[in-house]
Amino acid sequence: MIERTRAMYDFLRAAHQENHQPWGQMFLDGHGEHCVGATRFMEEHLELWVRALHRDEQPA
């Protein structure tokens, strides 16, 4: 998930730099900053995410 939100930020930033709409405008409208915040949140809570995603797995 972290890589995906980073990739979305990179995509929106590149679209803005290349004036590729509507993505470029979305970068200016705050979607890029949202991706930065979401990435930071996931990085800060990575251990919790991993535990939550694996909590129903049974040992083999």
Image: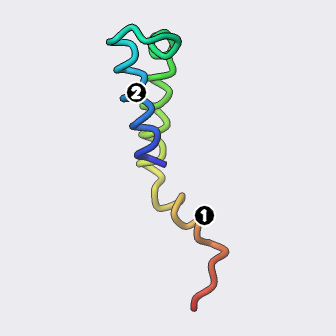
* Residue 41 horizontal/vertical position (percent): 47, 42
Q: SS class of the residue under badge 2? A: helix
User: Which quarter of the picture shows residue 40?
Assistant: top left
* Residue 21 horizontal/vertical position (percent): 49, 10
Q: SS class of the residue under badge 1? A: helix
Between the C-alphas of marks 1 and 2, the distance is 28 Å
37, 19: nearer the viewer: 19
- Scheme of image coloration: rainbow
Q: Quadrant of the C terminus?
A: bottom right
**Which disc, if any, is residue 11?**
2
Q: Residue at point 43% right, 48% down? A: 44
Disc 1 vs disc 2: which is toward the camera?
2
* Residue 38 horizontal/vertical position (percent): 49, 37
Sort mark 2 into few (<14), some (14-19) or many (20+) by Cα contacts within 10 Å: some
33, 44: nearer the viewer: 33
Amino acid residing under circle 1:
Ala
Residue 12 vertical placement versus 28 (above, below) = below
* Residue 51 horizontal/vertical position (percent): 55, 67
Residue at label 1? Answer: 52
Is 58 on the left-hand or right-hand side of 42? Answer: right
Is 50 on the left-hand or right-hand side of 13? Answer: right
Q: Earlier in the sequence, mark 1 or mark 2?
A: 2
Is 16 on the left-hand or right-hand side of 38? Answer: left
Q: Residue at point 47% right, 31% down? A: 35
Amino acid residing under circle 2:
Phe
Residue 41 vertical placement versus 50 (above, below) = above
Sort mark 1 into few (<14), some (14-19) or many (20+) by Cα contacts within 10 Å: few
